[in-house]
Image: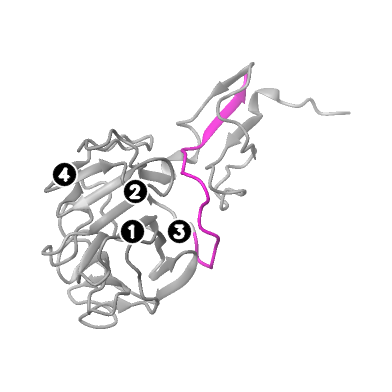
């Protein structure tokens, strides 16, 4: 005897535009349908039901030129505040016509929701520095010396990325865990900092740049900063685009950097 199909349980998922697969996050019973931008006729959207919660923060940097207002495009709509000079700028843009310009200031999320300790996470996006020779340019972190996680550019004058992971002292050395690729000014780079278990990875343009096994980290403070280093004295100088924070380890091996702007998944269920 044939079993009747339960049409009401059939769902279609619209994954992030950047990928052809959903990095293992497609829920059971859902089919990836990347051509969709909205639910077809006869289907209802269930965007909040699907794993869009894996994206905790998403900043496209596509606001009005000169504006200092930054909207979180994730389902969480987190509040982002500014300190110093940070604006949406049409001078540069990796995707679209604009990005976030850092001219001595930084962005802050202060609701403690992005404070990681034991959970896996990925922080990724694109950066373009105006001056690769400027030391200690913060890309993201909690900006507390010897605690938490911070990613910086040019900590020691060698123009490389440096990962700081600490719980009272920094892993690797007092100057963090350094990469080997010299960063050039006025060039777009994709970065991804990934924590999986007690292991940390930093990818540059999809290639493994820094690896730390068995790192110990305690997040200190309640804020999550974008564009501020752990010593808080030299904010990032340049542009950041498509900045995303996720509560999963999206990559643990080399990958192709995204070719399009990110989007939060849309999921549909048959009426």
Q: Nearer the viewer, mark 2 or mark 1?
A: 2
Q: Main secondary structure of the magenta part?
A: loop
Q: Tag 1: Cα neighbours inside 10 Å, few (<14), some, or many (≥20)?
A: many
Q: Which residue in the structure is indicated by mark 1?
A: 128
Which label's residue is closer to the chain start, 2 or 3? 2
Q: Nearer the viewer, mark 2 or mark 3?
A: 2
Q: Residue 19: x, y in percent?
A: 57, 49
Q: How is the structure coloured here?
A: one colour
| C-alpha gap between disc 4 and disc 2 | 20 Å
Q: Residue 15: x, y in percent?
A: 55, 40
Q: Please identify the quarter of the rendering in which residue 178 is found.
A: bottom left
Q: Please say whether residue 134 is visible from this viewpoint.
A: yes
Q: Are marks 1 and 3 in contact (CB under 8 Å)?
A: no
Which label's residue is closer to the chain start, 4 or 1? 4
Q: Are marks 4 and 1 in contact (CB under 8 Å)?
A: no
User: Is 128 above or below relative to 25?
Assistant: below
Which label's residue is closer to the chain start, 3 or 4? 4
């Amino acid at each position: 005897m044939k079993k009747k199909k339960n049409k009401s349980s059939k769902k279609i998922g619209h994954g992030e535009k950047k990928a052809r697969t959903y990095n293992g996050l497609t829920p059971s019973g859902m089919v990836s349908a990347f051509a969709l931008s909205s639910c077809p006729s006869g289907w209802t959207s269930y965007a909040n039901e699907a794993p869009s919660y894996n994206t905790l923060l998403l900043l496209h940097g596509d606001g009005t030129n000169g504006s200092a207002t930054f909207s979180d495009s994730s389902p969480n709509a987190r509040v982002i505040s500014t300190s110093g000079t940070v604006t949406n700028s049409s001078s540069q843009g990796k995707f679209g016509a604009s990005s976030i310009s850092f001219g001595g200031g930084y962005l802050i999320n202060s609701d403690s929701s992005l404070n990681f300790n034991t959970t896996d996470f990925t922080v990724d996006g694109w950066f373009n520095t105006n001056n690769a020779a400027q030391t200690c340019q913060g890309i993201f972190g909690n900006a507390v010396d010897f605690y938490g996680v911070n990613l910086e550019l040019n900590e020691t004058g060698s123009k490389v990325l440096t990962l700081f992971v600490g719980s009272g002292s920094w892993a690797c050395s007092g100057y963090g865990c350094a990469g080997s690729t010299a960063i050039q000014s006025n060039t777009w780079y994709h970065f991804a900092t990934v924590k999986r278990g007690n292991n940390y990875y930093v990818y540059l343009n999809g290639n493994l740049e820094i690896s730390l096994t068995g790192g110990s980290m305690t997040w200190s403070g309640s804020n999550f900063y974008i564009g501020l280093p752990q010593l808080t004295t030299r904010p990032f100088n340049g542009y950041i685009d498509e900045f995303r924070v996720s509560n999963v380890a999206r990559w643990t091996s080399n990958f192709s950097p995204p070719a399009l702007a990110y989007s939060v998944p849309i999921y549909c269920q048959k009426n």
